[in-house]
Amino acid sequence: MNCKTLVVELEDYLDEELDSELRTSIEVHLAKCKNCKLIVDTTKKTIQIFCNSEPAPLSEDTRHRLHDALVKKLGRPRA
Amino acid sequence: MSTPKMNATGEKSPQTRAPLPSQVVKEDEPILVAAAKAGDISAFETLVSRYERKIFRLAQNITQNREDAEDVMQEAFLKAYEHLSGFQGNSRFYTWLVRIAVNQALMKLRKRRPNQVSIDEDVNTGNDLIPREIEDWGPSPEERYKQSELAGILNSTIADLDPPFRIVFQLRDIEELSTEETAEALGLSVPAVKSRLLRARLKLRQKLDRYFRRSENQ
């Protein structure tokens, strides 16, 4: 395993879809290569930050328009 | 064919992501869907309230246009209601709803920019993926920013990605669809989803680096 081959396998490594042999080989490389370790750690962090980000509340106007559209379709005001 | 990393509740492994309470699939979803299918309007309204913010964000991230995003959200919920009887429950209701919203959003995007957006065209995922001179971010770099500042950073960062990468990232890493579900929703092959996702993740990592690197913040 080297830096180039790690990138080829990185997608499956991040998604935990590698067999144990390949996974171990990557982890051995990561223990030696500071650059690749930082790439993996900061990429995991990137995914985590986006995944954990909460969607902003809808504006009142947007909620009202959604409400009106649903009333028309569903036939009665939302609770 | 790769195996989606989902646990029994349909959530991804917590090793790389720790879902917030609002992201965890609520156990009552199948009950609400069954009630809505049987004509209980308030059950459908509960589903709308639960997912409206996420569907709006999804639409906003795909279309990059607030007005279009609002239309997409409305159309997605109306279509979901209209076709609810055809929902077989083979996937989560939310996954089904996301697919409807993605279709609506892609139609908007293509209508607005007919010559610029093709999600299924070959894209250059390039061989220049190995970044150099990486810096550590520290354990919780996002905590250096207020919630609203962080939201602004994430929005502008994802907006900078080209649509084929942005949409795949949105479905896989924000909406947490599996690789196979993402491929099906977008009409792409599994390898195409994987290569776009890797490119998107590394691009976003690179873009966030300027905000999160330790040396910029000490």
Image (cartoon, rainbow, N blue to C red):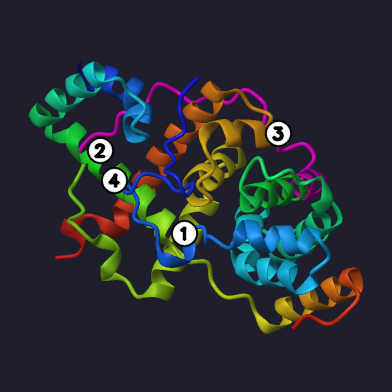
Asked if one can make out residue B203 in the rendered structure from this viewpoint, the answer is yes
> On the image, numbered disc 2 is attached to which residue?
A39
The kind of residue tagged 2 is Ile
Q: Which residue is mark 1?
A: B24
Q: Is residue B177 magenta?
A: no
Q: Residue at image x 30%, y 63%?
A: B142
Does the rendering let one see residue B129?
A: no
For label 4, the residue is B15
Name the spot of residue A66 as percent of width and height, x first: 77, 73
Describe residue A51's horizontal placement relative to residue A22 as left or right.
Answer: right
Using the rendered image, report if marks 3 and 1 lie on a common chain.
yes
Residue plotted at (69% across, 29% down): B187
Residue B111, magenta (yes or no): yes
User: For numbered disc 4, what is the local secondary structure?
Assistant: loop
The nearer-to-camera label among 3 and 4 is 4
Pointer 2 chain: A
Q: Amino acid at mark 3?
A: Ser
Nearest-to-viewer mark from 1 and 2: 1
Few, some or many C-alpha atoms within 10 Å of disc 1 (few <14, some 14-19, many ≥20)?
few
User: Which secondary structure type mostly characterizes the magenta part of the structure?
Assistant: loop
Q: For the residues tagged 2 and 4, is the chain the same?
A: no
Magenta segment boundaries in residue numbering? B106-133
Work out whether residue B133 or residue B47 is closer to the camera in this orientation and state it.
Answer: B47
